Amino acid sequence: MPLLQSPRNDMSTTNQLENPKVGEPRDNPIDITDIRRPALSNSKALENDIINGLLQPQHKKTLPSLLLWDEEGQRLFNKIIFNPRYYPYRAETNLLAHFTVNIARTIVSSAPDIIIEFGSPSTRKTIPLLFALDRLLTTSITYYTLDVDPVQLEKSLLDLHKLTELRNIKVRGLVGTYDDGAHWLAQHSPQPPRTAILWFGSTICNFDKEEGGELLGSFLKASDADNFCGALIAVDGCQDGERVNTAYNLPDGDTSNRILHAVDAASQLLSKDCANASEVENFFNRESWCFQGGCSREEGLQYDTCVAPLRDVSVTLRRQRIYVEVGERVRVITSRKWTVDEIVEVSKRQGLVISETWKDKGINYGLYWLQPNSEEHCDEADIDAHRQGMRAR
């Protein structure tokens, strides 16, 4: 699987976070541990993903979406999520606000020792849920937030520290990719802690079904099925192509600015200490690229977010010549819209079943609590109930 793992970007650090020893807490008032495995989790791996993506055949070229998640990329995304046309963020925060206590009860009833959130915590999503969990817990647990960008992680944890005072939840940060997180969890001995996962933002749907399922399954395997409490995942199931197009191509230019940032980030990364830096910068000249995107239904509804050059561009990277023709789309990120049947399919392959559903029926955006399925099958009546939203609380 490519480095595109956690929805943040590069390996830049603050002065406090420079060159931490892997596996050790940093000298910092916020408890952050770097769990990156150096051979797998460095900027060279991201460079490899960029080059390998651009070397793909025509109409198959890609740039890793990880390029969108540095500090500037996060700032640009924050402008998008508060746009009223961008329904996913609004739908998810409304669900969490309305069902926080019910969701917290469900998680607490599974008796986790630790909770791992994929990505840095959101003040409007994570904090209300942590408050609700803290009130219901009768024993102490640890909340970990896993993010590939140490700068964004530290900032988010500082904000969380200022806004919360939790009695029963210890807050920790982990710097690494999803793969690093699964590896870290598997190293616990004599046995892994009872683990619950939080995966918001419908991020699982940025992967294809096989990759997303395997990623989730890696944490199930790392914790051992007996110690895997469950995973709360957000999934955008909207099947209204017009609504999706409007949300992912905002008319004020915010979408374009954010996606073109991938071009800027790639240029900055690849031109550093490069003998042909000027050629690289010319290839990734922002003025020579434009944003393109649209819905397709080849494998269910999805929105492909791309950049395309306004002229023929070429560059030599690591002795390999790369050509991108004018107008050729280079995919940056795909936002898939999974139906309940697809969630069941992904879950079943990993030995999981939908246990609870909280759903916005109007938009078909849902929060799903997945747990190990001891019966080895999904009951059709339960599947239909989740499909119709009847199991929504």
Image (tube, helix red, strand yellow):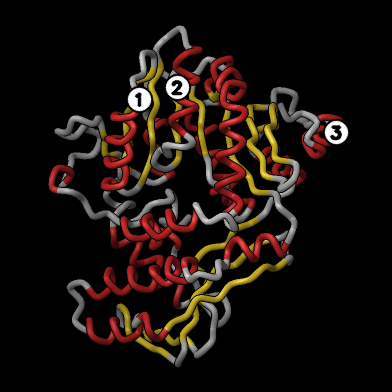
Do the numbered discs 1 and 2 sit on residues whose CB atoms are within 8 Å? yes
Task: Choose mark 3 or mark 1, whichever is in front.
Answer: 1
Amino acid marked by disc 2: Phe
The residue under the point 79% across, 39% down is 387
Task: Choose mark 3 or mark 2, whichever is in front.
Answer: 2
- Relative to 138, is 212 on the left or the right? right
The picture places residue 90, in percent across and down from the top left corner, at: 57, 46
Q: Which residue lies furthest to the right in this view?
A: 381
The residue under the point 45% across, 22% down is 131
Among the two numbered marks 3 and 1 on one chain, the one whose residue lies closer to the N terminus: 1
- CA–CA distance in space, label 3 to label 1: 42 Å
- Relative to 128, is 36 on the left or the right? left
Q: Residue 230 carries which label?
A: none
Residue matched to label 3: 380
Among the two numbered marks 3 and 2 on one chain, the one whose residue lies closer to the N terminus: 2
The residue under the point 68% across, 32% down is 358
Quarter containing the C terminus? top right
Residue matched to label 1: 164
Amino acid marked by disc 3: Glu
Q: In which quarter of the image is residue 315?
A: bottom left
Tell which of 256 and 57 is nearer to you: 256
Compared with residue 90, is residue 101 higher up or lower down, i.e. above or below? above
| Residue 192 in view in this figure | no
Amino acid marked by disc 1: Thr
- CA–CA distance in space, label 3 to label 2: 35 Å
Residue matched to label 2: 131
Compared with residue 314, is residue 35 higher up or lower down, i.e. above or below? above
Do the numbered discs 3 and 1 sit on residues whose CB atoms are within 8 Å? no
Among the two numbered marks 1 and 2 on one chain, the one whose residue lies closer to the N terminus: 2
Q: Residue furthest top?
A: 138
